[in-house]
Image (cartoon, rainbow, N blue to C red):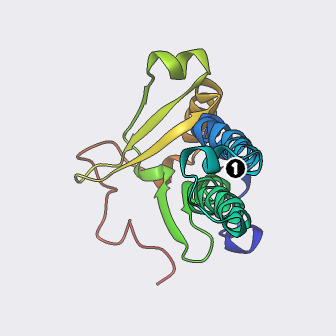
Amino acid sequence: MRKDLLPGEQVIVMTRPQPRALFLPAMVFILAPALAAFASAWIIRGGVRSLYPDLPADWTIWLVAGCGLAALWVLLGYCLPRLLRWQSTRYYLTNRRILARYGMMRRRDRQVFLGSVRNVTVTQTVLQRMLRSGTISLDAGHQFSAVLRDVPEVATFHRFVLDALSELPRDEFYERGQAPDGPDAGFRGM
């Protein structure tokens, strides 16, 4: 992140989304191997042979391997992608902008300059209130808005955003409908 900073820009806070999105993958991560082990033990003890007496004994190893592969498929196909998606999402607040970065291999960045932010809205569901997380919506005018979902410690992050907005130099943003005086007032060093 340091190499992506603008001159004079400092990182105030960096965070990831609330880890509650990992609850169901964590439960599946625990239950899938447990169910595979239970099914394998049932197969080895003769449970399948009691249901299908004509099944040859050499099929036992293939059925046990199938249970193990099914558990591995669930872990790699369901749990791992959700963990990597959570791990690769980050929210940065600097003294000049807010960045949301998504993805590992294929990166997607979304940034909003604090000078263009007109309204900051925090919304919380009941579960988010219990976990002290929430969704922050940034209205930047001109029908552009950015949404940061499941921000942990949303009240603190909101306060940091408001502090960063109040510390911006007055020449970086203007009241709605007003522009600086003079034909070249908005352009410097050209």
Res 166 visible = no
The quadrant of the image that shows the N terminus is bottom right
Q: Horizontally, is 136 left or right of 30 in the view?
A: left
For the point 74% across and 66% down, the residue is 61
For the point 67% across and 72% down, the residue is 4
Q: Is 189 above or below relative to 155? A: below
Instruction: Please state which of residues 183 and 94 is positioned toward the viewer in this rendering.
Output: 94
Instruction: Please state which of residues 111 and 187 is positioned toward the viewer in this rendering.
Output: 111
For the point 56% across and 59% down, the residue is 54
- Element on which disc 1 rests: helix
Where residue 164 appears, x then y in whole percent? 61, 41
The count of marks equals 1
- Within 10 Å of the Cα at label 1, are there few (<14), some (14-19), or many (20+) other Cα atoms? some
Instruction: Please state which of residues 42 and 126 is positioned toward the viewer in this rendering.
Output: 42
Q: Residue furthest bottom?
A: 190
Where residue 121 appears, x then y in whole percent? 40, 30
Instruction: Please state which of residues 103 and 33 is positioned toward the viewer in this rendering.
Output: 33
Which amino acid, by three-letter code, is at mark 1? Ile
Q: Is 94 above or below relative to 102? A: above
Res 61 visible = yes
Where residue 3 appears, x then y in whole percent? 74, 74
For the point 60% across and 77% down, the residue is 105
Mark 1 = which residue?
43
Q: Horizontally, is 10 left or right of 88 in the view?
A: right
Where residue 132 appears, x then y in whole percent? 61, 21
